[in-house]
Amino acid sequence: MAINVTRRQFFKLGGAGLASSSLAMMGFAPEPAEASIRQFKLAHAKETRNTCTYCSVGCGILMYSKGDGSKNVEQDVFHIEGDPDHPVSRGSLCPKGAGLLDFVHSDGRLAYPQVREAGASEWTRISWDEALERIARHMKDDRDANFVRRNAQGQTVNHWTTTGFLAASGSSNEAGYITHKVVRNLGMVAFDNQARV
Amino acid sequence: MTNHWVDIRNANLIIVMGGNAAEAHPVGFRWVTEAIEHNNAELITIDPRFTRTSAVAQDRAFIRTGTDIAFLGGLISYLIETDQIQREYVLHYTDAALIVRDGYGFEDGLFSGYDEATRSYDKQSWMYEMGDDGFVRRDESLEDPRCVYQLLRAHYARYTPETVSSITGIPVETIQRIWRKIAATAVPDRTMTFCYALGWTQHSIGSQIVRVAAMVQLLLGNMGMPGGGVNALRGHSNIQGLTDLGLLSQLLPGYLTLANAKEQDYAAYIDKRTKQPTVEGQVSYWKNYEKFHVSLMKSWFGSAATERNQWCFDWLPKLERPLYDVLDTFERMSKGELNGYFCQGFNPLASFPDRAKITRALSSLKYLVVMDPLNTETSEFWKHYGEYNDVDSSAIDTEVFRLPTCCFAEDEGSIVNSARWLQWHWAAAPPPGDARPDIRIMAELFLRLKRLYQEEGGVFPEPILNLTWDYDIADEPRPSELAREYNGRALEDLVDDEGNITRRAGEQLSGFGELTADGRTAAGCWIFTGCWTEDGNQMARRDNSDPYGTGNTLGWAWAWPANRRILYNRASADVQGRPWGANKAFIWWDSEQGQWTGADVPDFPTTSPPSQGQMPFIMQPEGVGHLFAGQSMVDGPFPEHYEPFESPVPQNLLHPGNSRARANPAARIFDDDREALGKPEDFPHAATTYRLTEHFHFWTKHARLNAVVQPEQFVEIGEALAEEIGVAAGDWVKVSSNRGFIRAVAVVTKRLRPMQIGDRQVHHVGIPLHWGFTGVAKKGYLVNALTPFVGDANTQTPEYKSFTVRVEKA
Ligand code: SF4
Ligand code: SF4
């Protein structure tokens, strides 16, 4: 890209609102000289590599957190930016990626297991133990009552159609793999992820 | 994507159609602007709207939503009739010369074998004709009236520029101008790429739109070429990975498929999927199906899976319906046929069509479990939020559990981008409060269930009790353990033909070529084999060098399959193995070394010389790309234009007299949902939903920065429509379909213009989808209150991009 934008101009335009969209859209990343000043500020931060969680361009990101990772030391992500080494994104992020930090710290983040009882109009906080035990009970009761070993034609089907599962295409391959391994081998077939829509 | 993001810079022409990459994939779109600036490329957009992508395009057409097959089908006819195809490529690398069975035909909008009662086809006649030698018959002259080329030509002869214009609303001159530009890439040294997204898939004919694009690329010789291909710009960050891992109702990992109830016999199940070559000497890689399947079963059931018990074939669930897709599931749920449902990072109340039906369905459940980092609308579907969620909590008996999960920043593992790259990431901080990783939640749930089955017994516990679970910490498997498992390892020593040990028991495998069908290997997802080898985690590699200057960075992360970056890349060389054009050199035959070489991992047997005559499309039994789909699609071997289920146009202009062929005759629609379709006279406006660059679905309304830059729900209408209904910019409008309504601020714009379709003028309404009743942005209406409950005939992807509404001043 031929146009040079300093980090300061970049954020200034970013603050101006919608102008940021088209700017980042065109992939203008701050100049390296400005970036080097930043190194000093981030010197004591822990740098962690990750990938933008939104779209499947898969832009590389660098996350900066306080705390050295040792036990009992609070770690907190305080800055996220594009990874300049990434061959697709080369340090750029779009307006979605530029807001990643606000996703991490969103007021909408859930912190504790909750249950909404039948007919209730509010949530009740519960422990993980209670939540998982109750869910496992529901699953087993439903599976034992409705699992089909043979269908009306006498064919072996070994499936469970009365509980279904939607998996998350924002989660990792490892989460997806273990989810498939568990869900399919309980006999579930009503099983999809966002790729269906 | 058949190709990848950086490769777009190698294109000479870029068609963005059924997508808006500048807005939805902004950083990937840089490579489009790079091609414009440094490769002298042209960008053309074909969309109902003037989009942010159109704004930087050199040429553009405005198309009525849902009519893409008409435009591209007409293009096929134009390419054939003006002889602007890449002839050598078409002759050798496609099925153009293959002969089709006599019974196949197409009449008045229906292919042979249609049964109206079941809305499906008997596909017997949709096949190539086999010769006495057991291989498909062919005609090199391409003149036999039963050869694919002539059938294709006859099929699209109806798609004249005038007909295409009357269906799509694009003026004839614009159509011809764009067709000419596309045809100019039929030469060996110029390539065109298609970039599409949900604007192609979210239609009742979505799969066929993608197919017609692939057919165009085959005719032009643009498949397998740098700067070519058909590139799906996929949505969520790991939607590719979850698809690859088979988390879909009919799949197993690596595009293996579950058996249906009729397939009771293991050998027949395998035999049907083990594709033998139908043209002599071809690779037909699916002939290895059993190796992939048995390795999966060994991964899941270890020593419990044996040849004697047919590798636990009976333990896998069998399908009794064609698909248990989400529309089928919510139909059954709305009728009280489900008791439980899990939503892991998925917000169906906002994401599935006909929101009123979704609310009804969820209300009939006994239990609902939501695992998510955010408080989604689905988790609070039972809670009253005024007009935004008008429900009576006391009347809903569903028990809802909400389990907080980690987000990306607190999670380690890999995700697959649209270009099939598996990229590893690391956690930067612990999650808030008591939130837990999805892996741990799934492990704990499983272990609790297993314990219950051990203690109490129960129905068919075998697969639960025997599922392999050799993780160091049983309730918290590490991502590295799971990644090594899906890569696969040798369970016993592997030996070559001479008896030399090639792989020791316990070692990680380096590629799927090592898999065996006799139980000596385990691999949880064969297409990922090679991602975590004895050399370690290949997904974490960070060498971004590009030695050939083609934009191919083989040392960055790892791509499936086998680290290949452009699929079908053998087709980038001619029959003799030489690059088609010097500027498009990518993979070629090196006769001195006796192997294929170049900028990518060859998508081909490395030492198979051109003289052996193996063709580039190694997954197909014929070795060639399919212009004729045979039996692989449910709605026809050639794509045909059908109207959306809700269309402002009362008939299909290609088949005006035949109401059965108005909308896709093979698409499934449930009775109640058909009743809920609107009529053009009540709902005259063509509607389409889409995303904005500042937002990602329903996530970013929870993020302050995004909520600030795009805070409030709006709909876009053109100036002519605004005038007609007496609305000024900034007024509130009510948008209704036959299923529900939303209210929003009207943005009155020049970006949408009325179109002349037959004898009527059609207005489009643009409906961005990002608002809801949770989050920090202003509350808004879930737009799926409006959308129809009908999907693509093949995939059941809902028809969100074409439906009808009525817009009025609120
Ligand atoms: S906030 Fe950013 S743009 Fe504003 S003064 Fe500071 S550095 Fe400059
Ligand atoms: S920064 Fe933008 S373009 Fe890049 S992955 Fe994230 S959402 Fe996609």
Image (cartoon, coloured by chain):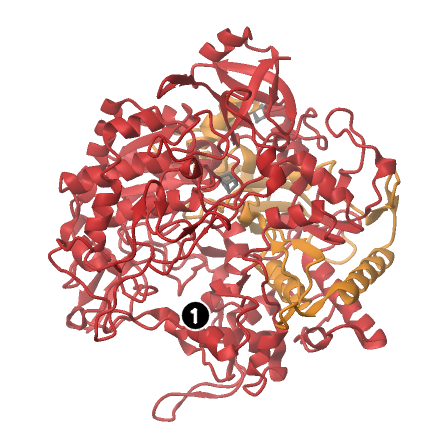
Chain colours: A orange, B red
Determine whether B653 is above or below B535 in the image.
above
Where residue B564 sits: x, y (%)? Answer: 36, 60
Identify which residue, B136 or B800, lies in the foreground.
B136
Query: Is residue B149 found left or right of B207 in the rendered image?
Result: left
**Residue at horizontal 60%, vertical 34%?**
B675
Q: For mark 1, what is the residue?
A: B273
Q: Give the residue type at disc 1.
A: Arg
Residue B6 seen in the figure? no
Identify which residue, B136 or B510, lies in the foreground.
B136
Beta carbon of the mark 1 residue lies under 8 A of ligand 2: no
**Local secondary structure at mark 1:** helix
The answer to which image quadrant residue B356 occupies is: top right
Where residue B612 sits: x, y (%)? Answer: 18, 73
How many numbered discs, if any?
Answer: 1
Query: Is residue A155 found left or right of B508 in the rendered image?
Result: right
User: How packed is label 1: few (under 14 Cα within 10 Å), some, or many (20 or more)?
Assistant: some
Residue B67 seen in the figure? yes
The answer to which image quadrant residue B281 occupies is: bottom left
Determine whether B686 is above or below B367 in the image.
above
**Residue at horizontal 71%, vertical 52%?**
B342
The answer to which image quadrant residue A54 occupies is: top right
Where residue B255 sits: x, y (%)? Answer: 48, 62
Query: Is residue B778 found left or right of A130 in the rendered image?
Result: left
Identify which residue, B332 or B721, lies in the foreground.
B332
**Residue at horizontal 73%, vertical 59%?**
B441
Where residue A14 sits: x, y (%)? Answer: 53, 26
Identify which residue, B650 or B245, lies in the foreground.
B650
Tell me the subunit letter for badge 1: B
Determine whether B451 is above or below B643 in the image.
below
Instruction: Name the residue furthest bottom.
Output: B499
Q: Quadrant of the C terminus of chain B?
A: top right
